[in-house]
Amino acid sequence: MSTPPPNSFRITSAPNITYAKWETERFETDSTSWIDLPGASVDLSLGQGAPSYGAIFLATFSAEALSSDQNGDGQGLMNATVFFGSEQSEPLSNNHRYITARGNPEWSSHTFLRVVRFEPEFTNRSVNAQVKLKVSSGDKGGVQNWVLKVERYNL
């Protein structure tokens, strides 16, 4: 029997806990640094006194999104990802394009998945899930009618 590579895991049961949040209000940004999407967070903890000492978290984020190309070069984009505490979830890259501006921008639905694994430790720690957004220089992006779902698989 082979061992799965470190960039995969096998789920053999339902999540121990599923968390969900959503919002209908529009949020727009022109920040070129990661900023929190207001309200798109789930309080999570690990360690002694928490639901588990370690866990795998699988986040699904879905929203209607818009990206405006302010530079006129046809490359306007908005990036999105989920941080768990101070750690950015996987897949980890410098290219988390969530939506790209093409022609006349319109709102459209987009979804992504992110995963993180925290090995068991006794020390209590906060690993809150937080959706973060950023845009390319000179661009603007936004989301509305979003849903954040986080599934917790205790270790």
Image: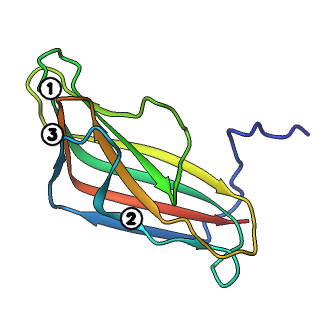
Compared with residue 6, is residue 77 higher up or lower down, i.e. above or below?
above
Q: Residue at x 22, y 46 (%)?
A: 64
SS at mark 3?
Answer: loop
CA–CA distance in space, label 3 to label 2: 23 Å
CA–CA distance in space, label 2 to label 1: 28 Å
The residue that disc 3 covers is 107
The residue that disc 2 covers is 41
Q: Amino acid at mark 1?
A: Asp
Q: Residue at x 32, y 58 (%)?
A: 147
Badge 1, how many Cα within 10 Å: few under 14, some, many 20+? many
CA–CA distance in space, label 1 to label 3: 14 Å
Q: Position of residue 155 (x, y in %)?
A: 73, 65
The residue that disc 1 covers is 69
| On-image quarter of the N terminus | top right
Q: Residue at x 18, y 31 (%)?
A: 139
Judged left or right of residue 5, residue 22 is left
Q: Position of residue 153 (x, y in %)?
A: 64, 64
Compared with residue 124, is residue 23 higher up or lower down, i.e. above or below?
above
Along the line of sight, which residue is nearer the eye, 12 or 131? 131
Badge 2, how many Cα within 10 Å: few under 14, some, many 20+? many
Lower sequence index among marks 2 and 1: 2
Lower sequence index among marks 1 and 3: 1
